[in-house]
Amino acid sequence: MNSIPSISCLTVVPLLGAVAVLGLGASSKKLARLLALAFAFASLAMTLVMWHRFNPADGGLQFEEVHAWIPSLGVQYHVGADGLSLLMLLLSAIVLPMAMAASWQVTERVPLYFSLMLMLQAGLFGTFTALNFFHWFLFWELSLIPAFFLVRLWGGSQRATAAMQFFVYTMLGSVALLLAFLAIFMATGKFDFMDLAELARNGQLLPALAALPHWQTFTAGKIALLLCFGVLLGFAVKVPLVPFHTWLPSTYAEAPTGTTMLLTGTMSKMGLYGFLRILLPIFFMEMRWVRTPLLWLAVATIVLSAYAALAQKDLKRIFAYSSINHLGYCMLGIFAVLKYTGDNPALATEKAAALNGVFLQMFNHGLTAATLFWFVALLEKRSGGLRGLNDFGGLRKVAPVFCGLMGIALFSSLGLPGLNGFVGEFLIFKGTFPLATWPSVVAVLGLLLTALFILTILQRVFSGPLPEKWSQMPDLTLGERLALLPPIALMFVLGLYPQLILGVLNSTAMRMVWQLRF
């Protein structure tokens, strides 16, 4: 427990910012942008203070707050953060200012736009820290509402269809989550994630599920497996995992770029976080029963999405499928650690390596993918809205700084050693090869396909003859260079010194390995 409610304060700040920005008149566009950015930087500063205060030697929850809310329903205000939660808070706090900078040219309903972005950040903060399902579900849904309106009101020509598809898919997953946890509450009288995980570890969850009324025709194992599938569906849609991914390319392509940056940089991590924080601790035995098909779904997510990226001509759709591909590596690592290893220390070490890789990949993908979409926005700004793979060529001759910095982000996505994208993927494969050899072998094909479409972008957009119509395309301005400097610098810092994050996360990974040893 802490005398200062750090997490509550952090969650309230963007909410207050959303209200303050929304209260501005429609004509106060510049003030709305600056005020929203000030609240975003305030959240980043608070997150950095929490990162500094966090004790990396303790892999458990810190900054914990517990207050009675609705005792008769088992609902508490219970929040806390371990290394994983804190990393996701930091990622959310970094990506939002980037998304706001990329959205600086928005001219319609500016206060509403930036207010919705702050509201979305509050939903993210709550999702990554809430430890009671009732409380957590409110924030899970809170993030959906502003994301829907951001796509629907400021998106491209097909925004209505994309927004509706996004809403229907994610709402279907939310309904499955809600029904599953209502059944769990009926059986146990508990909503708290830590309590439910403890019941699962002690073997008390299955007997409780067996006593559910009107379910006597099912065994406890079948009931648990059914509920596990319901929770899995909710998170698989959000990541997304193939075949629940079809909403993502159109949504990313039609959303305004700042919103796309938030969707790929932070909201996709909500699904991965749910797997790690909720699904694995509570349903680790049921997940182990279906480990093999889940592993091959992860492989399909990696390989098929990379292959689909090769077939795209729109840069936003290429990076959308690339996002699915990179998140597939995280799913591969998560499913690989389900392997039963008992007290084998060698395999326990590989599990820790895989989980550390997953954590690092979540952060690195969020940073790199958001930066790449930002570059697409800058390209659209200079070309009058064009973003086709074949619309350009030879741009390095007139915009060398633009091409050089975007090339760094592309090579980070490729996993070039020395940049942040390499270490996470390396750790994932290091851990998964001993735990799930053949799925890991096939998944390596995804690395080859990724190299093909990344190098295709470099060739088609930056190299070759320069069309006459782009001969006067301006390079990055000084302000744009300064804005892009922090994420680009961070790619180098984490590529050369990943211990900056791994030193904080390793104890959390080891704790998860211990909990999943059974």
Image: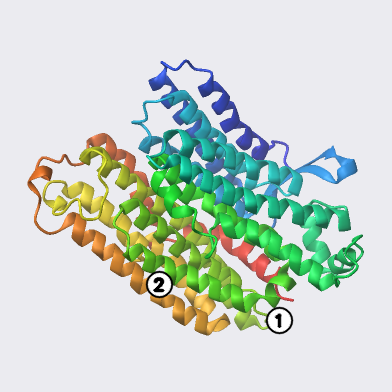
Residue count near mark 1 (Cα–Cα under 10 Å), binned few <14, some 14–19, many ≥20: few
Q: In this view of the protein, which residue sits in the foreground, 156 or 290? A: 156
Q: Quadrant of residue 286?
A: bottom right
Query: Which quarter shows the N terminus?
Result: top right
| Residue at image coords 18%, 42% | 475
In the rendered picture of this protein, how many numbered marks are placed on residues? Answer: 2
| Residue at image coords 61%, 79% | 292
Colouring scheme applied when the structure was drawn: rainbow
Q: Which mark is residue 63?
A: none
Provide residue 163's location: percent of width, then percent of height: 50, 43
Q: Quadrant of residue 71?
A: top right
Provide residue 259's location: percent of width, then percent of height: 45, 41
Q: Amino acid at mark 2?
A: Gly
Residue 412 is left or right of residue 442, and the answer is left
**Residue 57 visible in the displayed image:** no
- Where 203 sits versus 347, above or below? above
Provide residue 192's location: percent of width, then percent of height: 79, 52
Q: Amino acid at mark 1?
A: Asp
Residue topped by disc 1: 343
Q: Earlier in the sequence, mark 2 or mark 1?
A: 1
Query: Which quarter shows the C terminus?
Result: bottom right
Provide residue 403's location: percent of width, then percent of height: 21, 51
Residue count near mark 2 (Cα–Cα under 10 Å), binned few <14, some 14–19, many ≥20: many
Say what secondary structure mark 2 lies in.
helix
Residue 421 is left or right of residue 389, and the answer is right
Residue topped by disc 2: 446
Q: Nearer the viewer, mark 2 or mark 1?
A: 2
Q: CA distance from mark 2 to mark 1?
A: 32 Å
